[in-house]
Image: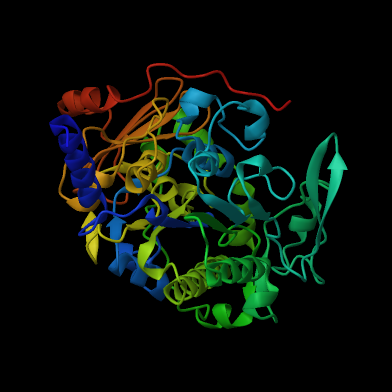
Amino acid sequence: MNSIIRVSIFCLVSASLCLFGDAAPKAEQKPNVLMIIVDDMNDWVNALDGHPQVKTPNIDRLAARGMLFTNAHVMAPVCNPSRVSVFTGLNPSTTGIYDNSVHWHEALPGVPTIPLHFKNNGYHVVGGGKVHHHTPGNNRYSDWHEYFDQVFDSHFQVESQLIGNKNVPNFAWPAGFPLNQIPEVVALKKPPVNPREFDWGPWDASDEEMGDGQMVEWAINFLKKRSEKPFFLAAGIYRPHLPWYAPRKYFDMYPTGSITPPPMLENDLDDVPEGGQRMAAARREDLELVRRDGLYQEVLQAYLANITYADTLVGNLLDALDASPAADNTIVILWSDHGWHLGEKEHLHKFTLWERSTRIPMIIAAPGITNAGGECAQPANTVDLFPTLNELCGLTSLDTLDGISLVPQLREPGTRRDRPALTTHKFNNHTVRSERWRYIRYSDGGEELYDHKNDPDEWHNLADDPQYKEIKAKLAAWLPKQNAKTLKPK
C-alpha cells in the first residue's frame, strides 16, 4: 500500500479514536443528538446551587452524567434573539436581531442553522415545541424532516390565524382568567394577537394534558423507534415561561408562606447608570401589582412549580432515551434561552444584562467525551453550541460562526477559554462575564463592574473606582467592534 495512503488512513483513524473513544465508528454510527430547551429558566436548579428549595432531580441527574457549565450565559436576555443566536451560531450584534419582533427566517434567508446543517450532513432532523421563538406557524420548516408544533395546553386552546401573512396563535384563556385574580391583567391584554401573559395558577390536569406534555409524548414516541440514520431531535419545553400554569401537584410542592426569597438589597439601583435603570424599569407594573396585592410568595410558588414541571418533562425524555435503541450513542444537551428576575434590582422579568437574566443551566453529556459529574467554571456562551456540535459529530465546520467549540472543556473542564461570555440586549448594550468579573457598557456609555468573588449578587457597582480602570479596559476589549443595525419586521 502506498505509504502516503497508509499515513492518511492512520490519521483519519486516530482522529476518530480521539473523538469517539475506543473504537472508530463507521459513518452510520455518528452520534445522535437530543437537544432539550427550556424557556425562561434561570439558575434556580440544584446542580447550580440555585434556590434552596427547588426540586430539579432530573436536571441534576443529567448534570451528574455529563458536563455542567457553571458559568454559562445567553447571547441575549430575550427569547427570539437568544434562540436565533444559538441556531445560527451568530451574535445579535452580527445579525441585528435584538428583539422578538423579527421573524428570523425572513430576515436571514440564506443563513444555515443547526438543523439544516445536520440535515445536509445526512441526519434525520426533527423538532417539536418551542425551539425557535415564533411558533406555531412561524418556523422554517424546510430545515426539518418533521416538526411537532403543538406547544400550548389542551385546556388553553390555540388556533393559528392568518394576520398580515403571519400565522399567529390566537389564545383562548382558561375559565376564570386571570387565575391570579389581578384584575389589571385583563385590562392590560392586547387582543387579539398578543394577549397579556402575566398570569399563573394550578390546573387540575395531568402532565400529558398540558401542551408541553403533549410535545414530550411525541418526542418519546420518536425515541422508541430505531432510526436508520443518526438523528438530531430538538425538544422545546415552554415552561417556565409565563403564563405559569402547571398541574396542581407541582404547586403543592411549594406551600406559600415558607418559600425563601432571593437575596435583595434595598436601594440596589442607586449606583446603576441610566441605561440599567431603564432596563430594570421595563414592565415594572407587574412587580408593582404583585406587591400591591401581596402576591410575592405566590409568584415564587408559581415559578418554582413550573421549573419542577419542566424538570419532570426533562426526566421523561431522559427515561425514554435510556430505554431506546439510541441510548449509548446520543449526545444530550440542555440549555435555557435566558434567566429571569424575581424582584432583584426591582425587576420581575428578563430584559437585563445582570447575572439573573444572563446565567442559565447548560449541560452537555457526550458519550466517550465527557466524564460523569464534570463541572466547568470557564465562561461559556450558548452561541458556542453550534461549533461544539459540529466537532462532536464530525460535521463540516462553518467559517461564519461567532462561537467557539466547547469540546476542549468537555474533555478537560479546567482548560482555559480565551474570551469571556458576551450578552447583548438591544442595540449596542453589552455585558461580558469572565470567571470573576461582570462588565456592562450601555449604548450611552454608562458602565457597571461587579466582582463576583466578593459580590455574587452584584450589589456594588465598581465602575467609577479608578483602581479598576485596567480591569475594565481588558473586559471592554471583548465588546463587539461592530453592531449591526436593528432589523425591523417585514
**Where is residue 272 shown, x and y percent of the image?**
39, 35
Q: Residue at x 63, y 53 (%)?
A: 286
- Asked if 397 appears above or below 234 in the picture, the reply is above
Taking the spot 37% from the left edge, 38% from the top edge, the residue there is: 387
Q: How many marks?
A: 0
Q: In the rendered image, which quarter contains the C terminus?
A: top right
Residue 93 to residue 248: above or below: above
In terms of depth relative to the viewer, which is nearer, 411 or 197? Answer: 411
Looking at the image, residue 446 sits to the left or right of residue 418; the answer is right
The image quarter in which residue 56 lies:
bottom left
Judged left or right of residue 10, residue 317 is right
State whether residue 377 appears in this view: no
Question: Is 380 in front, or is 227?
Answer: 227
Would residue 222 be found to the left or right of residue 45 on screen?
right
Q: Could you say where residue 264 lies in the image, as x and y percent from the top left? A: 38, 56
Image coords of residue 399 (percent x, y): 39, 25
Q: Quick one: which residue is furthest to the front in this view?
A: 1
Q: Is residue 406 above or below residue 243?
A: above
In the figure, residue 140 lies in which quadrant?
top right
- In the image, residue 471 lies at what x, y percent? 19, 28
Residue positioned 62% across, 47% down in the render: 144
Q: Is residue 111 visible?
A: yes
Q: In this view of the protein, which residue sits in the foreground, 16 or 289? A: 16
Q: How is the image coloured?
A: rainbow
